C-alpha cells in the first residue's frame, strides 16, 4: 500500500497543504514508510494564524470555568483512547509500549494541571494601596501562540505547551516534528471532539520554512520550542528579533555520579533506565557515568552485564522488547560513526551496539565506552542515542568541576547514601534539574522543566507556574470610588 499523504489541521478540520514536497514518516522498527508529511510553505502558516486570530477574539472571552470544562472532557477522551494513542506513538517513534504509555501519561498530567486554570490564573489585589485607592492585577492571554516540537516525545512535549496556553485563553499553532506527525494530529482531533472551538488549536506540518515562518510571523505573540541547542538558539534569536516571547529548550549532556557507598542494584537499574530508556533519545538521558574512586570498576562491570541482558527487538511486534530502534537511518548511521570516533579518540568499547542487532529497522544496541576523558568528543557532545560513556574522576570535587565545565545544563544525578555528599552535589552543580538517587530528574507537570546554560534560551520554562506566566501578561488596575469623588461627578 502507498503511504498516506497527511494533512494540516486548521480552523477545526483537515486542510490540505499548499506545498508539493513531503518527508517520509517511518516505522523505525521495520524501516517501512507509513505516511508522508507535507512540507508546508509559509502561506499555510499564514492561513493557520488567521484562523487562530479569528478564534482568539471569542476564546479569550470564554469564562475560565468553561475553558476548564473542555479540558476536563479532553482529559477523559485521552484516557478513553489511551491504548490507541500509545500504539500510535510506538508505531511512528519506535518506543516500547511501556515507554509510549509513559510519554502519553506525562502529557495527560499537564492537561490535568491545566484543568485547574481557575486557581492558577488568579491575580493579586491590595485594598487601600493609597488613600481611597484599590489595586488589582489580572493575568491576561497573549493572543496566538506557537509550538515547535521534536520527534522524541510525540505526545508529552506538545502537551507541555498547548493545553496550558489554551487554558490561559490563547489560541495555538503547533508544528510537530515531520518525523512523528501522526500522534499530534490525533491529539488535536480529540481536542476538537472534546468541544474546543474551531481555530483554537491548529497544526501546520513541515520543516525549516514552517519553523522560520512561525518565529517571524507578526500575528504570533509567543513561541515555545524543544530540540537541539543549535536550533533553540536560532529560534530564540528569530523570535526575539520580531518582538515575541520565546522559551527554547535545547540539548544536554547529563552526568550520573556514583559514589563508593551507592547501593549497587538500584543504582544500576536507574542508570540503565536513564541511559537506554527511549533508546537514549531524550534530553534528560544519562550520558556519562562517573564512578568516583573505587566505585568505577564495579559499576562498569555491572552495567556491561545489564546491557548484555537487555532485550532489543522491534517494538511493534515484540511486546517483551526493553529497548527499541532509533528514529531513522540517519540517526543510526550518525551513532555508529560516533562510536567509532570515540574508540579512535582512545575510549575503550566495553559493549558495541553495532553488533547483534535486528537486521530490519533502525537499531543501535546499548553501547558502553569506558576510560572517557573530558577532552573527548564523547564527553562534550550530545549523541542522542543509546551510547553511555564511563569516566573515573578521583573525587566528588573533581566530578563537580567536570559537570560545571559543560556547555549544557539540564540534569545531573548522584547516587549515594551520604547526605553530606548529596547536599554538596546539589548546591554546587550548575544545572537546572538535580537527582539524588533518581536516574532521570525530569520535572513533573507542577514544576518547571528547568534547563540552564545553553540547554535553555529564555526566561520562563515550560510546565508549572512558569508555564502559566509565559502564556499570560499582567494587567494592573487602580481604582478610586470614595464618596467625595462620587459627589463631584454628580452621582
Image (cartoon, rainbow, N blue to C red):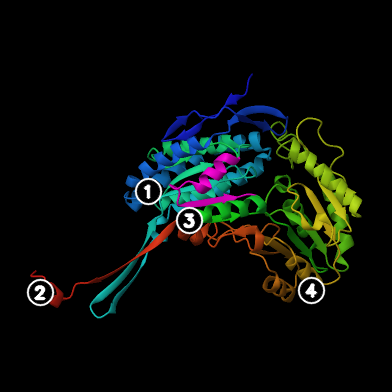
- In this picture, residue 153 sits left or right of residue 396: left
* Residue ID for mark 1: 67
Total of numbered circles in the picture? Answer: 4
Mark 1–mark 2 Cα distance, whole angstroms, equals: 41 Å
Quadrant into which the N terminus falls: top right
* Residue ID for mark 3: 243
Q: Residue furthest left?
A: 490
* Residue ID for mark 2: 487
- Is any atom of residue 164 visible in this view? yes
* Residue ID for mark 4: 397
Label 3 or label 2, whichever comes before in sequence order: 3
- Vertical placement of 221 versus 363: above or below? below
Residue 258: percent from the left, percent from the top?
Answer: 79, 64
Residue 213: percent from the left, percent from the top?
Answer: 52, 43
The residue depicted at 42 percent of the width and 58 percent of the height is 472
Mark 1–mark 4 Cα distance, whole angstroms, equals: 50 Å
Q: Which residue lies furthest to the top in this view?
A: 1
Which of the 4 image quadrants contains residue 335?
top right
Determine the secondary structure under disc 4: helix
Residue 219, magenta (yes or no) = yes
Residue 52: percent from the left, percent from the top?
Answer: 41, 42
Mark 3–mark 4 Cα distance, whole angstroms, equals: 43 Å
Determine the secondary structure under disc 2: helix
Residue 407, magenta (yes or no) = no
Amino acid at each position: 500500500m502507498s503511504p498516506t499523504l497527511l494533512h494540516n489541521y486548521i480552523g477545526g478540520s483537515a486542510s490540505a497543504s499548499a506545498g508539493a514536497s513531503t518527508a517520509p514518516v517511518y516505522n523505525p522498527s521495520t524501516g517501512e514508510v507509513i505516511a508522508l508529511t507535507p512540507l508546508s510553505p509559509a502561506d499555510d502558516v499564514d492561513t493557520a494564524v488567521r484562523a487562530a486570530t479569528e478564534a482568539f477574539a471569542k476564546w479569550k472571552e470564554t469564562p475560565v470555568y468553561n475553558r476548564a470544562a473542555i479540558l476536563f472532557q479532553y482529559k477523559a477522551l485521552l484516557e478513553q483512547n489511551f491504548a490507541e494513542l500509545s500504539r500510535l506513538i510506538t508505531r511512528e517513534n519506535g518506543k516500547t509500549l511501556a515507554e509510549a504509555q509513559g510519554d502519553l501519561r506525562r502529557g495527560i498530567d499537564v492537561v490535568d494541571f491545566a484543568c485547574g486554570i481557575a486557581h492558577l490564573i488568579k491575580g493579586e489585589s491590595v485594598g487601600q494601596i493609597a488613600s481611597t485607592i484599590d489595586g488589582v492585577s489580572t493575568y491576561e492571554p497573549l493572543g496566538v501562540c506557537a509550538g515547535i516540537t521534536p520527534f522524541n516525545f510525540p505526545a508529552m512535549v506538545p502537551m507541555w505547551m498547548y493545553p496550558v496556553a489554551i487554558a490561559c485563553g490563547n489560541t495555538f499553532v503547533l508544528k510537530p516534528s515531520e518525523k512523528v506527525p501522526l500522534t499530534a494530529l490525533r491529539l488535536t482531533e480529540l481536542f476538537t471532539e472534546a468541544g474546543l472551538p474551531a481555530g483554537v488549536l491548529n497544526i501546520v506540518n513541515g520543516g525549516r520554512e514552517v519553523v522560520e515562518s512561525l518565529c517571524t510571523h507578526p500575528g504570533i505573540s509567543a513561541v515555545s520550542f524543544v530540540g537541539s541547542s543549535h536550533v533553540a538558539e536560532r529560534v530564540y534569536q528569530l523570535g526575539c528579533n520580531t518582538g515575541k516571547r520565546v522559551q527554547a529548550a535545547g540539548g544536554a549532556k547529563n552526568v550520573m555520579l556514583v559514589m563508593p557507598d551507592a547501593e549497587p542494584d538500584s543504582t544500576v537499574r536507574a542508570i540503565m533506565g536513564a541511559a537506554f530508556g527511549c533508546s537514549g533519545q531524550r534530553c534528560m538521558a544519562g550520558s556519562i557515568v562517573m564512578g568516583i574512586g573505587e566505585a568505577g570498576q564495579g559499576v562498569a562491570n555491572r552495567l556491561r552485564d545489564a546491557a548484555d541482558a537487555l532485550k532489543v527487538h522491534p517494538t511493534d511486534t515484540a511486546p517483551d522488547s526493553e529497548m527499541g530502534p532509533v528514529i531513522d537511518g540517519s540517526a543510526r548511521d550518525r551513532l555508529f560513526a560516533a562510536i567509532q570516533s570515540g574508540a579512535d579518540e582512545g575510549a575503550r568499547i566495553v559493549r558495541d551496539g553495532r553488533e547483534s542487532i535486528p537486521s530490519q529497522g533502525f537499531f543501535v544496541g546499548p553501547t558502553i565506552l569506558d576510560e572517557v576523558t573530558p577532552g573527548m568528543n564523547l564527553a562534550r557532545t550530545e549523541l542522542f542515542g543509546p551510547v553511555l560513556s564511563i569516566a573515573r574522576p578521583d573525587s566528588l570535587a573533581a566530578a563537580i568541576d567536570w559537570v560545571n565545565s559543560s556547555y549544557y545544563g539540564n540534569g545531573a544525578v548522584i547516587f549515594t547514601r551520604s547526605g553530606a555528599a548529596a547536599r554538596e552535589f546539589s548546591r554546587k552543580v550548575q544545572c537546572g534539574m538535580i537527582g539524588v538517587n533518581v536516574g532521570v530528574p525530569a520535572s513533573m507537570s507542577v514544576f518547571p522543566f528547568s534547563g540552564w546554560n545553553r540547554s535553555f534560551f529564555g526566561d520562563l520554562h515550560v510546565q508549572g507556574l512558569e508555564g502559566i506566566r509565559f502564556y499570560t501578561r499582567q494587567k494592573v488596575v487602580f481604582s478610586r470610588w470614595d464618596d467625595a469623588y462620587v459627589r463631584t461627578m454628580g452621582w
